[in-house]
Every structure is written in structure tokens, then in C-alpha cells.
Amino acid sequence: MSESNGFSPEQKNFLQGFALGTDVSRKVRGLPVLSGSGGSPGGESITVGAAAPPAAGALPFDPESMHSEAQDQQVAAGGKLVAEEKAKREKPPSGMWDEMVARAADGQFPKGTDVFLTKYYGMFYVAPAQDSYMCRLRFPGGDLRSWQLRGLADLADKFAGGYTDVTTRANLQLREIKAKDPINVLTGLRDLGIINYGSGSDNIRNVTASPLSGIDAEELIETLPLARDMHYYIIHHREMYGLPRKFNIAFDGGGSISALEDTNDIGFTAVRARGDELPEGIYFQLTLGGITGHKDFARPTGVLLEPKECVEVAAAVVRVFIRSGNRTDRKTARLKYVLDDWGFDKFLEEVEKDLGRTLRRAPLDACDPRPSDNRQGHIGFHAQRQPGMNYVGVALPVGRIQSDQMRSLAEIAEKWGTGDIRLTVWQNLLIPNINDEDIDDVKQAIESIGLDWSANSIRAGLIACTGAAGCKYAAAPTKANAMAIADYVEQRLELDTPVNIHLTGCHHSCAQHYIGDIGLIAANVDNPDDPDGDTVEGYNLFVGGGYGIRQAIARELFPALPFEAVPSRVAALLQAYLDRREGPDEAFVDFARRHEVEELREFCSLQPVSS
């Protein structure tokens, strides 16, 4: 053996080849080379284990550097970083813990761009709507345990407003947290096994999945394990934080309840390949660019993935977005706009470069289409694939649960189930694994705490964002308005089929009004009693939206309605549907789409509903 470096010539050649191969792989993925071996294998020397150590505190490779490099490139091209990008660059949010502890000890809320940076910890200072924090949590796939819900009830009583809100990302929020209590809440969440770092700001939001994963007789594949894998990948990869803008990922298993994956930046839809173009089996179609608030659904890429490939490919998509997303204009910083600018072919080429391999492609008709979901599947009692077992979907008034109800739901899940609880994107929750003989007892227990399990109520399809009561962007108190609409309609007519009514408070469209059967977005409108005076709370009313196989952006039916006119218009529209539908099996969305907007307006004027 040669004494030079302690390696024989054969060992040197092997190590040179290994290092060169590693560098080539990293170069293809856009990562810096590590060994400096980019020369020919015939180079005179290599350094293995004898290189000078990095400077104190330095890392040989910082995975977060891709963010600053992307910022630098856009500045070099003549752009100007927005305030949020400057804030992330000047003060890394992951190092703010001590500052937040000191601020809480002084009973102070954040100011300036610190308001934005504190959202990394899931803490939103929501003034002027409320002089308090909202805390957004994380439950991959919407899956939580009864003891966690009970613990959250205690946190809500001690440090928040005594309730929680279920969101349209199968998640929970705590509200009315005082300036002195964010650390108490965050440490309390960790004690409950809830990791919510990155749940706000320019990060990947709660990863969603089919809520019936593992218990649905109709599903093609379980998606909860994939959501969990994605969740933990994000947590353990620092480059997955601080994106150009927020980012959503969803996995749909093809079962009874949709995960609304086509409204996400990355949507994975389970499909069955027939064996014509590729081996028969279950794959995931990769769709990209969903953002319904900007009137766009995720579009098919033609890429089919095996389940084990999904997390790796999602991470590559995110890394390409990190490098290419707009950091100079918040309005066009979402993935959709990269796709609009580059086109799908160029974007996928960059994803393949990052992965270091090509992606499997097949025409859409190589797979059976996803079957329609059960639009009543998230409410009421339904049989599971396990014989003799059932789940119940509990209807929650616009997603809000009081702390005592949280404890009672935890007890129901433990007493008659297995302690499992699933949140859904429809702002409600499911309790699975209920024996046939226990259904009547569970019904009584749900009713006894002031909640409902019926699928026939108008409230079962009622979706509302936080609204002006807790969000500075909202132009109306959407949750209160939603309840008022439900009260008005239920007193005047009875629906025998589900109709989704979505109320959102601003252009961010957290309640996804464009995909509702009836969608309402808040607006300041002229006062009909005083046209020259101050504006009043109101809504623009849309109709005929949908998702999945009914995918469509809703059409505007009534612009600028004062809220006092909204309940009667909604009731008139629903009554017109009941009177004019083509049989009891025609869904509201199909009724709405076979009529022009002017016809629907006329139906409403001819169909007054008594006050």
C-alpha cells in the first residue's frame, strides 16, 4: 500500500470514481458538489478524510441556501424583493424562539415584519379583527387521537377562547390567545405530540388525505401513510420552509370522500391502470397548480407515480418552485404562475433534473377515471369496509367546537370507537370504528352535546372562513352570516339532497367559494337605503361550482347583494331547484349548469320565499 494518503492506487481509483459519481448526481440535481472531484479520474490526487475542516460555524452545504440564491438571481435580473422576502433573509424565523419568549414575558405582540415571521410558528397576530393570536395546528391527513382533542380543549380553556375551529384543510385553529400566552400554547402542543412549525407564512400547509383512509370499501389505496410521510419529510428538511408563497399538497385515494386534491398546488389522485400502456396496478396521477381563489384547478401532468415515489417527487416539485417562484410580487408568487410562464413541459424537465431521472408518463385514458364521491359521505352513519363497523360524520356549525364538546367527542371516540378522530376538508370530523349495535347510543350522545349527525340539514354543507370576527382581510362576519342563512332556509324549505354553500370573507378564498354549489364572497356594497352614504356588508353570489368529476369555477349570479338580501336569494334559488329539477336524482350543480345565469335570476324573482 502506498504511504501517500494511506491509500493504494486501486483504492484511490475507486474513491475517485465514487466521488465523481456523487458529484455528477448532485450537479444534475442542482446541488453543490462536495469533493471537488469534477476533473478526470486520472487526476493526480484526491482528498479523503484529510480535507481542512470548515470554518467555525460553517456548514459544507446549507440546504437553505437555495432560497438566498433564488433571491439573488431575481435581484440580479433587476427585480426588487418584497418586504416578506427581505424579512426572511434578514432574520431567519427558525432562530426567533428566544425573542418570542421575551416578547411573551413582556406581554407584547409582534410588530412590523415580525408579525409575518411569527406565523412560521403557527401564531397569527390577527389585529385589528382581534387583539390576539390565532394558532394554526398540523394534523397530517386530518388524523388525531381522542387524548389530543381532550388536551386541546384544556389548552383552549386555559390560554385561548375556549373553542377550536375546524378548517378547510382538515386542521384545527385556536383563537383569542393573549400576548403573554403563545409560548404556553406552543409548548402545550408539543406536549400533545403536535408539531405545527411552518403551519403559517410562506410554507407548506397541512398535508391532507382521504379522511376514510383504511376504512373505506371504495378506496383504491390508503393515503394517510403518504400524508404522514410527507409531513415528516417537511419537518426534517430545512429547505422545505420559506417558499416564495404558501403551498398545498393533498393525496386522494379514490374513495367515498374527496380530498379536494384538484384545489392544491400538488394533487395526487389514485387511479387504476388497466395494463394497456403500463403494468396494471394502482398509481397516482400528478396534478399541479391548483388555486381556486385565482380560478384555476390543478391540471394533469400526464405523470403517473407509484405510491412509493410520491413524496420524493413532491419534494422535487417544491425545490423547483423554490428556485423559480416569484419573490418580487406576492400576487404572482404561487406555483400556478410559474406553470403559466414556463409551461408544464419545461417545469417537469426541471423536476426530472432535480430527481436525476425521468418520470413515468401515460395518457389519461390509460387509467380508469376516478369514480364519483359520495357527497353525503362526510355526514351521518356509514358502513366501513370492516364488517360490523361504522363511522359517523358529525356536523359542526361552520366548523366551530366548544371545549366541552371537544371533551365529549373525545369520550365518544373512546367509549364507542377506538379513540381515532378524522378531520375533513368539509369543516367537520369523523369518528370511526363504531359497532353496529352502538349506533343508537352514539346518536344520542352526539345530540346530547348540541351537535348533529344528520345528512339532511342545510348545515351539513355549510362552509365558512373565519370572517371579520377574526381576520383583518374579511369584509363580513362570514360564520355568523352562514348561521343566519341556515336559520332562514331551514325555516322555509327542506332539502332532500346535499347542497354546499361556501362563504368566504376576502379574495384569499379560504372557504373556496368558487367550488361551492352556491358560493358567496364578502364585499362592501352600496346601502340600498342610502346610496350616497357609507357602504354596508354584502356579498357577490356565485353558482354552479364543483370539484373532481364535477370540476368547474362557479358563475356570478348576483353581484353586490347587501347581506340582508342574501338569505332570501339563497332560499329562492334552492326552492327553484326543488321545483324545477329533472327528478329527485338531479344534483343542484347539474340543475344550475343547464340554465343560463339570466334564467336562474328569473327563477329567483318568480320564486319568492316568504319572510
Image (cartoon, helix red, strand yellow):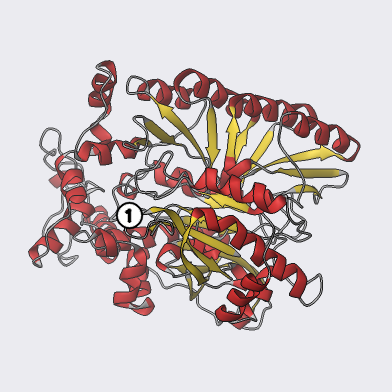
The residue singled out by tag 1 in the image is 533
Q: Is mark 1 on a helix, strand or loop?
A: loop
Picture coordinates of residue 557, whole percent (x, y): 52, 71
Drawn side of residue 386 relative to residue 475, left or right: right
From the viewer's side, name the closer residue of 481 and 111. 481
- Direction from residue 263 to residue 278 in the image, left or right: right
Percent from the top left, x then y, of residue 67?
22, 53
The correct choice, above or below, for 436 with respect to 536 in the image is above
Report whether residue 371 is seen.
no
At x 35%, y 35%, the residue is 121
The amino acid type, in three-letter code, at marker 1 is: Gly
Q: Residue 260 falls in which quadrant of the image?
A: bottom right
Residue at 31% of width from left, 63% of height from top? Answer: 320
Give the class, few, some or many, for how many residues have Cα within 10 Å of label 1's Cα (few <14, many ≥20). Answer: few
- Say whether residue 431 is left or right of residue 59: right
Vertical order, 564 against 106 (above or below): below
Residue 105: give x, y in percent of width and height: 27, 16
Quadrant of the rendered structure where residue 432 is?
top right
Q: Name the residue: 69% across, 30% down.
A: 409
Residue toward you, 136 or 41: 136
Q: Quadrant of the C terminus?
A: bottom right
